[in-house]
Amino acid sequence: MGVVMRMVAAALTAYGPPEVLRPTELRVPEPGPGQVRIRIRAAGVQPFDLGVREGWVAPGAGPGFPVVPGNEFAGVVDRLGADVGDFAPGDEVLGYSLLGAYAQYTTVPAEQLVHKPTAMPWTVAGGFSGNGQGAHLALSRLRVGPGDTVLIGAAAGALGTFSVQLARAWGATTVIGTASDRNHDHLRALGAIPVTYGEGLVDRIRAVAPGGVDAALDAAGPEGLRAALAVTKDRDRVVTMVAMEEAARLGLPDWGGNRSAARLAELTALYEKGALDVHLRATFPLERAADAHRLVATGHGRGKVVLTVG
């Protein structure tokens, strides 16, 4: 019998607060047909992962513990399953998954990977896929394009920062971003006009865009969604990433979409042109994944939280 390879992962053996996420030794997964095994160098931390830790079971996730969170990553191709022709051992890649990225190794279908741009740092690559594809899906749904005035709620966060840049890359003339005062310089540097959260938000947006906005992406919550509806000319061009119950109450239609390697490749091409970047809020080693979750849970932070894997 061959030697069984072991790895370290930040895993759950029970649901609960951040401290249930602990370094755990697990067996290294083997790639099946059409799959690639990745030696992970960095993994992004998303609110989705916090939901998994607290007990939300993602559709398609297998039952039982241990559970290894993490749905975006970057690393080096380590081993190929049968019928994989687009990658080779040693290739630097980034990609996405449902779970499993908080680990030294993971396996994913080859169609969930793209080659990493050579100049892209590992920390940026590890936190690129999730918010990048989320922004792409939302702004595509909103039909953002040349000449638009676009409102981005919670614009200084990881998703918001990406969305501001992508809206600009797609030709939006004016991007308005809601944020706390301490993040206004950050938004100006991205090319957005900042406005402050809180009472009077609708009036402050209208002062900047007296004719209203063409499209709005809410990542702040119910108050932000209501403000977006108040200032957007066509309610069919308003979406939320967070206030789903409020959206249903207000009669907004459900929306969604699927991540894809083609979408991710489009985003990495924009990165290589200098039109997109990941703004890092903090990095933590894998064994401090619980601390990363605590930081993300505080909300309204600037930029992305990423785990580094040795």
Image: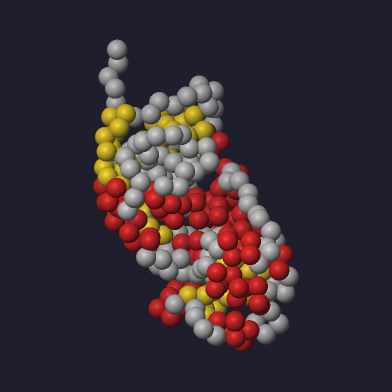
Which residue is rendered at x = 55% and y = 63% of the image? 243
Which residue is rendered at x = 63% and y = 65% of the image? 249
Measured as percent of width and height from the top left, residue 116 is found at: 47, 45
Measured as percent of width and height from the top left, residue 158 is found at: 46, 62
The C terminus lies in quadrant: top left
Q: Is residue 72 visible?
A: no
Colour convention of the picture: secondary structure
Q: How many marks?
A: 0
Measured as percent of width and height from the top left, residue 22 is found at: 27, 45
Left or right: 118 with respect to 292? right
Which residue is rendered at x = 51% and y = 68% of the image? 220
Left or right: 81 with respect to 231? left
Which residue is rendered at x = 69% and y = 59% of the image? 253
Left or right: 220 with respect to 298? right
Q: Vertical placement of 291 versus 186: above or below?
A: above
Q: Vertical placement of 270 versus 38: above or below?
A: below
Q: Is residue 106 visible?
A: yes
- Work out whether residue 100 or residue 308 is closer to the camera in this orientation and state it: 100
Give residue 6's quadrant in the image.
top left
Q: Residue furthest top?
A: 1
Measured as percent of width and height from the top left, residue 199 is found at: 51, 83
Q: Vertical placement of 289 versus 222: above or below?
A: above
Q: Vertical placement of 19 versus 172: above or below?
A: above
The N terminus lies in quadrant: top left
- Work out whether residue 154 or residue 84 is closer to the camera in this orientation and state it: 154
- Work out whether residue 215 or residue 173 is closer to the camera in this orientation and state it: 215
